[in-house]
Every structure is written in C-alpha cells, then in structure tokens.
Amino acid sequence: MARRVVAVGVTATLATAGSTFLAAGAAQAAGVRASVVNAAKAYLGTPYRLAYGWTCGKAAVDCECLNRHAIWDGTYAATGRGLQLNYWLQGQINQGRRTTAPRPGDLIFWDTDPNDGIRYGGDLDHTGVYVGNNQAIDANAYYGYVKYDSITLGGTEPDPIFVDVLTPNGY
C-alpha cells in the first residue's frame, strides 16, 4: 500500500510540473507574438521601396521585407533566436501553416491583382503582419509607407489568407 501511495504522489507531482511547463510555454508563445507585433509597429511610417531577393534594408521596405524584419526582430528580441523568413511571398507561406483563426504575429496575404488570373495560386501580390482586431501592418506601395490596414485592405480584398509561421518553427 505504501508503494502505491508513493506512486500516486509522484504522478500528481509530474502532472503539476507538466501543467506548469505548458503554462510557461503558452506565456512564452504569447510573448513572442507580442514582440513580433511590436517589431512591426516599429516600422510604421517607414517609406516603401520595392526590393528583390535579399536586398532590402531597414530604412525603406517592401511588404516581404517588412514581414522578414518583424519576424526576425520580434523572435530575436523575445528568445535570443531569430526566425529567418524566405524573401518571397510563396516562400513565406511555405514556412508556416494556413490558419482560419489568426493570432497577432501571424502573416496575412492578399492577391491584389485581379488581372493575373491566379487566385492564391503562387502569384500572391501583397503581405503584412496581423496585429489583432482585424488589423494588419503592411508596407503599402499605394500609400508609399508602412501603415495600419484592415484585413480586407479597406474592403477591396475580402478573403485574405493567414499563415502561422511562429508555431511550426518552434516559437
């Protein structure tokens, strides 16, 4: 009987330790997401400049660059380990998983060219960082700077896709 009581006591201790670990993991994930959002906010007002490949800097950014900087800066600030995103939109999508329940820090993608004939078929045109409350931050070529936008780009894009790149990559 004593052995059984000891075993039950150990199980209870492990369960408690396990739930504490899960709570810490969830808190860390929320902290990483908040850090990514804060990193995106740091670029508000930054001029827009189209850059191809790995050529973008921080003084002026395009939409893919904004994502790369926000994800790297935010994950590095929160964990000391930055997540490097691909430089092109489809590559960024492929680094994560699509979600229908977006959380702050997820990426958002739009197909803004109605004439290309490829709805989300590898020819996406625009991206940003979802910040919550149906808002995103994007480097907007039309306005010429990084700004807040609605997730529908003011109603012109009613069905964006959301991609979680943080969770699948261990953040």
Image (cartoon, grey):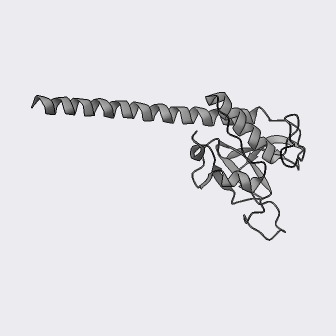
Considering the image in quadrants, where does the N terminus appear? top left
Q: Position of residue 56 (x, y in %)?
A: 86, 41
Q: Position of residue 9 (x, y in %)?
A: 22, 29
The residue nearer to you, when weighing 29 against 102, is: 29
| Residue 10 as seen in the image, left or right of residue 149 | left
The residue nearer to you, when weighing 104 against 70, is: 70
| Residue 157 as seen in the image, left or right of residue 62 | left
Q: Residue at x 63, y 47 (%)?
A: 165
Q: Position of residue 131 (x, y in %)?
A: 67, 41
Q: Residue at x 51, y 32 (%)?
A: 27
On screen, residue 118 above or below 64: below
On screen, residue 38 above or below 154: above
Q: Residue furthest left?
A: 1
Q: Position of residue 62 (x, y in %)?
A: 84, 45
Considering the image in quadrants, where does the C terminus appear? top right
Determine if residue 152 is in view. no
| Residue 27 as seen in the image, left or right of residue 78 | left
On screen, residue 99 above or below 6: below
**How many circles with numbers are drawn on the protein?**
0
Q: Residue furthest front?
A: 3
Place residue 15 in its image quadrant: top left
Q: Residue at x 49, y 34 (%)?
A: 25
